[in-house]
Amino acid sequence: MKICCIGAGYVGGPTMAMIAYKAHDIEVKVVDLNEERIAAWNSDTLPIYEPRLDEIVKERRGKNLIFSSDVHEGIRAADIIFVAVNTPTKTYGVGAGRAADLRFIESVARTIAEVATTPKIIVEKSTIPVKTAETIKQILAENSDGVEFQVLSNPEFLAEGTAVEDLLAPDRVLIGGELTDGGQKAIETLASVYGRWVPDEQIIRTNLWSSELSKLVANAFLAQRISSINSISALCEATGANVDEVANAIGKDSRIGPKFLKASVGFGGSCFQKDILNLVYLCDHFGLPEVAAYWEGVVKMNDWQKHRFAAKIVGSLFNTVADKKIAVLGFAFKKDTNDTRESAAISVCRDLLAEQAAVTVYDPKVPADEIRKDVLGDEKNDHLSVVESAYAASEGAHAIAILTEWDEFKDLDFEKIYGSMSKPAFIFDGRNILDHAKLVDIGFRVSGIGR
């Protein structure tokens, strides 16, 4: 069996590396037109950071795991083709700001139809709107020379920072296909790949549309829990309650459970906001405005939480941060990843810069150029700087804002940091990861989320 994955990003790279790692007899080729990204996958420094990914890639690379920019050859040789290209939110035209931009999906489908000469199983790995498979099938049927294709939906449920763990021991693998003999045979072929290491009872078979919709709904439900507890964090601050104690108490209820009840400055990442907005657009499209408004509220609450955090910094620093140095520790949207998409840090930095603060950022994995681009785009602003340590960021600062829960921030020498800061010295713990009582004893004015 030969597998080709089109798209060498956060989904395609780790997923294919795991298949190659667990199935030595399968040739796995990851292809992408971005030659710089392919070169990075073939180098000692991978383009994405995930714990353990480096060792898995290097063990199989050059054996049964190949990274190449020859997309056509990858398509021609493969039995199964995974499509893992980007599906960003549209920024133009109908559905702008909510609908998924499927131009890359369509382009891949047309390329497959043009190049393929033998039957293929096409696997949707990208997060896409329900009924996208119908579009792919139409393009393949009307642009190929009689070649037989089966289209499957196999959404990813990876959490960045734990992607390798999620691939090694997934809660479930979801495969959706057509209710035809060919569709069911294709489902079992793909199931046999995952079956090398995933128990069969954890491989869920559904129809195409259930599989496509399940990914959007799963992310919407998880994001809803975060926005719900974040809304309660504001009430906790107003009443003197402790949001961690509230979350612990309600999380003990077996009907609710403890996961995704951690209050913070806000959720980020490539999936949650994009998928909820996609769901909102679908609901509007199918004439369900009340349902659309319900889910849109999850995103609005998340945006409000980010702005509320920045406003809290300004208010605490005597209602002005103009020319005051604010140290931002952490820029990735969560620990153990270098992904910054929709990171809360972007919004907070922009709000502080709008107040003319001098913002100094440190993150252990995110490059300085990426931080500047995310915050400023193509503009320039001398009030934003990026440094190489938490201590350099904090020196002379009026306040520290913890925006990513990196473990190293828990072990900083805060007495040393306090001595280097302007007084009064503030810490705004946007992840509630620090020992607030200890920091108060040192002399800091400390503010957390929901406390």
Image: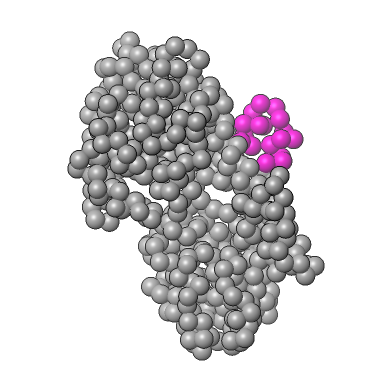
Residue appearing at x 42%, y 43% in the figure:
167
What is the count of numbered marks? 0
Residue furthest to the left: 62
Relative to 84, say whether 427 is above or below.
below
Relative to 102, say whether 416 is above or below.
below
Residue appearing at x 45%, y 51% in the figure:
162
As drawn, is 216 to the left or to the right of 316?
A: left
Query: Residue 147 location, x and y as percent?
Result: 32, 13
Residue 92 in magenta? Answer: no
Question: What segment carries the magenta color?
Answer: 277-295
Q: Specify the quadrant that holds the N terminus.
A: top left
Residue appearing at x 68%, y 59% in the figure:
248
Front-most of residues 67 and 312: 67
Q: Specify the quadrant that holds the C terminus.
A: bottom right
**Type of secondary structure dominating the magenta stretch:** helix
Query: Residue 91 location, x and y as percent?
Result: 52, 42
Does residue 441 appear anywhere in the picture?
A: yes
Front-most of residues 355 and 20: 20
Residue appearing at x 60%, y 67% in the figure:
432
As drawn, is 400 to the left or to the right of 138?
A: right
